[in-house]
Image (cartoon, rainbow, N blue to C red):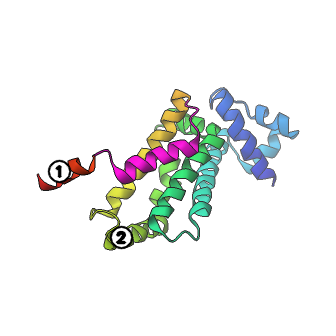
Amino acid sequence: MRCEEILDKATEVFAEHGYRNTDVQYIADPLVIGKATIYRYFPTKEQLFLAAVERGVSLLNETIGRAVDRVNDPIAKMTAAIRAYLEFFENHPDLVELFIQERAEFRDRPKAIYFEHGCDSKEDCKNEWRSSLVGAISKGRLRKIPPERIMAVTSDLLYGTMFTNHFAGRDKPFEEQARDIQDILFRGIFSDSERRKAKNS
């Protein structure tokens, strides 16, 4: 429990002050503990920061996992995942700040934690989504395109939306934004007549 409390407070403080300007004492004081207690769990400020980011990504994975659990229909599953992703970052804006700081402060790391520990990096997670999409394609519900392409484009779209929301300070409700993404992603922007023209060209 103490470890979770430390990571919660660390996320908040790093987001507010930035990695370089954060003294571990800023994290210890609100928790009414000494810096030495934090260092028992996390020997350096860098390890504390990276642990906070990794925990945030794990929470994201868990949130999406709960949202799609027991959802068998592949389209409904994608819908639930999109909604859960946007809702998560609406509720955890501090984590977006940490993603930005990680890139700025630890440029020598080969891969950002978001990509190192996210669903895109886990074979079991990727296989589950791939299988779901293949099933939808085989039933004629989705176009016959590689499922990896669908996964990559959807993932990139959500990742970009998360940062755009943060930087632009958008206050559009996540439910409405999820509906917009689903509409454009699933139905496209072509009219039926334009789709027929594109198909025949």
Q: Amino acid at mark 2?
A: Val
| Marker disc for residue 134 | 2
Residue 9 place in picture, x, y as percent: 75, 40
Q: Does residue 158 lie above or below 29 as drawn?
A: below
User: Which residue lies under the disc numbered 1?
Assistant: 198
Q: Name the one closer to the observer, 20 or 73.
A: 73
Is residue 174 one of those drawn in magenta? yes
Q: Main secondary structure of the magenta part?
A: helix
Identified at 64% across, 51% down, the residue is 55
Mark 1 neighbour density, 10 Å: few (under 14) some (14–19) many (20 or more): few
Residue 130 found in image quarter = bottom left
- Which residue is at 65% across, 43% downward? 91
State the residue in front, 170 or 7. 170
- Residue 189: within the magenta? yes
Residues rendered magenta in the picture? 170-190
Q: CA distance from mark 2 to mark 1?
A: 24 Å
Q: Which x, y percent locates residue 22?
A: 69, 30
Label for residue 98?
Answer: none
Q: Secondary structure at mark 2?
A: helix
Mark 2 or mark 1: which comes first in sequence?
2
In this rendering, the answer to whether 167 lies above or below 122 is above
Task: Give the residue type at disc 1.
Answer: Ala
Asked if residue 118 shows in the view, the reply is: no
Where in the figure is residue 82, as x and y percent of width and height? 51, 52
* Residue 146 in sight in this render: yes
Q: Secondary structure at mark 1?
A: helix
Q: Residues within 10 Å of mark 2 (few under 14, many from 20)?
A: some
> Which residue appears farthest toward the right when viewing the image?
32
Q: Is residue 100 left or right of residue 129?
A: right
Position of residue 27 measured from the top left corner of the image (x, y, whole percent): 77, 36
Q: Residue at x 46, y 59 (%)?
A: 121
